[in-house]
Image (cartoon, rainbow, N blue to C red):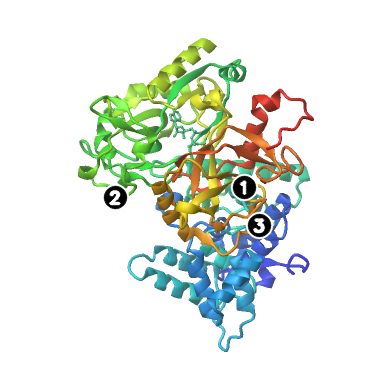
Amino acid sequence: DPSKARYHPVRDACWARGRPVPYLALARTLELVEATSARLKIIDTLANYLRSVLALTPDDLLPSVYLCLNQLAPAHEGLELGVAESYLMKAVAGSTGRTLAQVRAGVAREGDLGRVAEAARAAQRTMFPAPPLTLRGVFAALHDIARTTGQASMNKKISKIQTLYVACRHSEARYLIRSLEGKLRIGLAEQSVLQALAVAVALTPPGPGGVTELDASKGMSPEEFKARVEATARAIKRSHAQCPHYGRVLAALRAHGAAGLARHVRLTPGIPLKPMLAHPSKHVSHIFDRFERERFTCEWKYDGERAQIHVPARGAARHLPGAAVFSRNQEDNTSKYPDVLRRLPALLKDSVTSCVLDCEAVAYDTVNKQILPFQVLSTRKRKDAREEDIRVQVCVYVFDLLYLNGEPTVHRPLAERRELLREHFQETPGEWQFATSRDCTSVEEVQQFMEEAVKNSCEGLMVKALTGDQSQYDIARRSHNWLKLKKDYLEGMGDTLDLVVIGAYLGRGKRAGVYGGFLLACRDPDSEQYQALCKLGTGFSDDELRDLTAQLRPLALAAPRAYYCCGAAPDVWLDAARVWELRGADLSLSPAHRAAIGRVAPDKGISLRFPRFVRARPDKRPEQATTSAQVADMYLAQDQVKNSAPTANNYD
Ligand code: ATP
């Protein structure tokens, strides 16, 4: 048990200076991380490993960070693992002389193919052991597997996986298989990895010519060292927020140290940012409480798809080389919007040489000059659209400017960003428009503006701080400086919920053979669990259920994931992959469901009553589903809960 032994990443994995990092060094580190839930201990363990990499084999820092995060490349490169469990089971069975049924039974028992694979590998004797795996070798092989496409790609992938798997020692198999599944399940959030990197860099600072000091904390007081870690963490997190590209951030860190990051890593057109997000607000009057002292502005909240438009440079005439459209998740949507790209030059006045714009692409009826519902937009082809085949036109509503002519503008107040927008960009009715806005000063005015927004097919309003520091663009943050006010909130419970489908119920009677209902869960980032919140069974037509069944059936699992937290089992467990937006009558405490358990009541979860399907959210990953903390907040914000005595119950 490495958590008890005096584990040392270098000695224990036989790792020598300048040599490739053995994959075992990372696997041992992940074992330790998995064995604890204490965040400080996790950061300490990981920092210890990263320091060793910095000092001994700095070229392996980038693959180390990526493998800890279970990523292969920046999101916009679209390179993803996530090999289906059934294929991984086949690979494990095939390499260890077990039957598929045995492997399946193991997974049903353990709830984790990684551990089953580790045990199967350990029980196997090999006459001629393969050379030990190196971290960079595994990283390159995972890239290769993710890139293997086309005919017979699955068989090719399985054979590549088997080559890696048979070379695994100790816990390497567990983490290799989990990486391939797309889930490490060790409770390691990106912010913890960045913090660990900050500790490692503060202790063992890199710079021109490599690491010069092995323990820079010597001679410092604990307070001094803490301040140094905090400054380093701020520099790293800030650079990564502006330029979410580990290749660039780590290269600059190695070459210039933490102090040089701000100068060398900046917001870069072509590299999509995580967008600023809003908090829900339930009453118009809350806006006035929130923005008591600052100025704010209201904008229509368009119901389409977020589009971050990047123009890295301006070529001759209308040519905009490298212009791209990115999604809310930093995916490259450029090939979805050839029409938008073609029209882009019309938006830019001659004064613009480069820019990044935050916008909403909305389906638009060009004949009646009307916004169309989101559902219409979702029928557009998602990739490689040809302009001549496009049936659904879009109008792009521009609401923010993040970069202009070589300079980030995110630190300027919104009022200035808006002025720059109007100065350097121009509208084309039905194609490019600035978000309709009004700087309201009374509750009645906000209500009136809200009604106008809803009449014009918008979801409601976005209310934003307009001046002062608070009105900066908070990259990657869900901020109280942006409040969303949707029509629905004013009528019912807080926000809609974005939930993950984790199970299905078999249909009965004329619905036999298809799924007739679904189990949905929110996500608890602290425990990395998916916690069941409701059963959804109504509101689907027979055809819709047939379609959904066909889509979801490949996600069926032999057993629930170890990180599912549910009261009762559905008929079929499904891999957490799909996010659906749901509306409900209200949230109530529930002995049956486990969502947000312990947050409001020690032994009761929260359930969504009378859930209704709003739409699928292909633009959200399961990790971005509504969190248990948000569910608890929404529960507590309900009038009937707020107004009841603290001891009162309102059970499901
Ligand atoms: P989440 O539920 O995680 O906050 P979401 O994608 O479900 O995100 P909402 O929070 O409901 O969206 O609303 C924020 C979204 O509204 C933005 O991501 C953007 O796509 C859209 N939007 C429409 N109009 C505006 C606007 N004027 N300003 C900012 N965002 C807008």
What whole-number distance in Å separates the C-alpha atoms at marks 2 and 3?
A: 40 Å
Q: Residue at x 65, y 33 (%)?
A: 635
Percent across and percent down for residue 504 are: 53, 53
Residue 404 appears anywhere in the view = no
Neighbour tally class for label 3: few under 14, some 14-19, many 20 plus, Cα within 10 Å:
many
Per the image, the residue denoted by label 1 is: 532
Q: Nearer the viewer, mark 3 or mark 1?
A: 1
Q: Earlier in the sequence, mark 3 or mark 1?
A: 3
Q: Nearer the viewer, residue 621 or 398?
A: 621
Residue 347 appears anywhere in the view = yes
What whole-number distance in Å separates the C-alpha atoms at marks 2 and 1?
A: 36 Å
Q: Nearer the viewer, mark 2 or mark 3?
A: 2
Neighbour tally class for label 2: few under 14, some 14-19, many 20 plus, Cα within 10 Å:
few
**Identity of the amino acid at label 1?**
Ala
| Secondary structure of the residue carrying numbered label 1 | strand
Q: Residue at x 47, y 40 (%)?
A: 539
The image's mark for residue 167 is none
* CB atoms of marks 2 and 1 within 8 Å: no
Question: Considering the image in quadrants, where does the C terminus appear?
Answer: top right
The answer to whether residue 160 is left or right of residue 574 is: left
| Secondary structure of the residue carrying numbered label 2 | loop
Q: Earlier in the sequence, mark 2 or mark 1?
A: 2
Q: Residue 420 lies in what quarter of the image?
A: top left
| Secondary structure of the residue carrying numbered label 3 | helix
The answer to whether residue 619 is left or right of residue 584 is: left
The image's mark for residue 384 is 2
The answer to whether residue 381 is left or right of residue 458 is: left
Question: Considering the image in quadrants, where does the N terminus appear?
Answer: bottom right
What whole-number distance in Å separates the C-alpha atoms at marks 3 and 1?
A: 31 Å
**Identity of the amino acid at label 2?**
Asp
Q: Nearer the viewer, mark 2 or mark 1?
A: 1
